[in-house]
Amino acid sequence: METIRIEEKILAKNDELAVANRRRFDAAGVWVVSLAGSPGGGKTSLLERTVPLLAGQWRVGVLEGDVETDRDGRRLAALGVPVVQIITGGTCHLNAGMVQRALERMALDQVDVLFIENVGNLVCPASYGLGEHRRVVVLSTTEGEDKPLKYPAMFRRADALVLNKVDLLPYVPVDLAQAREHARRVNPGLRIFETSCATGEGIGEWIEWLSERRESWKSAGSTG
Amino acid sequence: METIRIEEKILAKNDELAVANRRRFDAAGVWVVSLAGSPGGGKTSLLERTVPLLAGQWRVGVLEGDVETDRDGRRLAALGVPVVQIITGGTCHLNAGMVQRALERMALDQVDVLFIENVGNLVCPASYGLGEHRRVVVLSTTEGEDKPLKYPAMFRRADALVLNKVDLLPYVPVDLAQAREHARRVNPGLRIFETSCATGEGIGEWIEWLSERRESWKSAGSTG
């Protein structure tokens, strides 16, 4: 099957560039977390909550990925941190090469924690490592409890799941316990947070996890 | 750029197969509507509302696309209509070849209206015509009003937009008028419906549109 061979070649090339990005992050002492998930699940809103809470402790930067428009980049730049907007121009995911090019415009020696927000897509971004240290998938309660089973790759490859929009639980027919169970079936080691970017619920626990992970990465010598 | 050339070759091959599918649909007198949109936006729920209302008038069939699991296919088969579940096994969109293969298991001479539900993805399915007569994009109110600008291809290539989950409007910070305005900026001819599959709101107007479109296609000689 020719299509598959081509895909493998693209992925192998991506993996090489991801390794190079990772080396560069490690050398600069920058801890990198990527966020992926469906359109409208709350990735940008989560960063709007997260960045100000981390900014007292660390210097934060953001690479913001979108198919079109710099709307999300502008939302995050308004927080007063360095942001590079990557517009993929139709491509359904970020890849390591796009991140590499974006880094030309981000002064890594002035950043401790870098967030990379992917294009809204629960499928394709799973296949493309970017060199990040931790991968986070954001799933909105409104999307239903079956998504980890229907889109398993993203959940399998993530370190943490943020179940966002819990403030809407009274109004949507979703079984959150089942969502967690489905996610753990796909990835037993997944760390799960339940948040509302509207009310701030659960954000504290998420910030604590980021802080701990960043600390233990730093004390382990910034390599894993 | 090698990647782009390969993509063009894949798309050209897809377009050929889509034309073949369309000929087959036309020859069999089957009117075909595809649904695409983000995961959890309500595509399957919309079909659960739609199929019983059309089934008195026409014989309805469904091709159901998912990355993994036959959960949605089983939900729709429970309505008593023929359903073929297509599991893409990781691929982020249906293509015309997958539809062609699925048709081996669907008796087109016993179907008047065929729905094809795509994988939940607001990006990739836009590029792959399936041979359908009408394309519909389903967007949930919870996804926010900016999605037509951020994911324009899907909205540009659609004939109709179903703005679903209007029952959640009191609880989500979305400006529906702006969502409509953004969608029309990308595609001035887009027909827009506002629905709730939870309450049934707006479903009547959507059914009416489908019925009218099906009739006018039939009376025009089943070719456009």
Image (spheres, coloured by chain):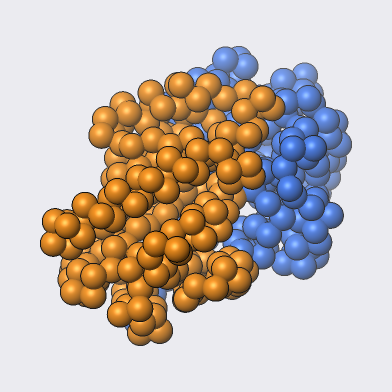
Chain colours: A blue, B orange
Q: Residue furthest front?
A: B56
Q: Nearer the viewer, residue A106 or A199?
A: A199
Examine the image and state in which quarter residue A30 appears.
Answer: top right
Count of marks overlaid on the render: 0
Q: Residue at x 18, y 74 (%)?
A: B27
Position above or below: A177 against B208? below
Q: Residue at x 38, y 23 (%)?
A: B181
Q: Nearer the viewer, residue B120 or B206?
A: B206
Please give left or right for residue B136 compared with residue B83 in the image: left
Can residue A223 be seen?
no
Q: Nearer the viewer, residue B59 or A138?
A: B59
Where residue A191 appears, as percent x and y from the top left, is 80, 52
Work out which quarter of the rendered image holds the N terminus of chain A and state it: bottom left
Can residue B61 be seen?
yes
Please give left or right for residue B1 compared with residue B158 in the image: left
Q: Residue at x 72, y 29 (%)?
A: A197
Examine the image and state in which quarter residue A204 appears.
Answer: top right
Where residue B96 appears, as percent x and y from the top left, is 30, 69
Position above or below: B98 against A43? below
Q: Nearer the viewer, residue A45 or B172?
A: B172
Q: Residue at x 46, y 21 (%)?
A: B177
Where residue A215 appears, as percent x and y from the top left, is 82, 39
Examine the image and state in which quarter residue B215 appears.
Answer: bottom left
Please give left or right for residue A195 compared with residue B104 in the image: right
Where residue B216 appears, as percent x and y from the top left, is 21, 52
Q: Residue furthest bottom?
A: B104
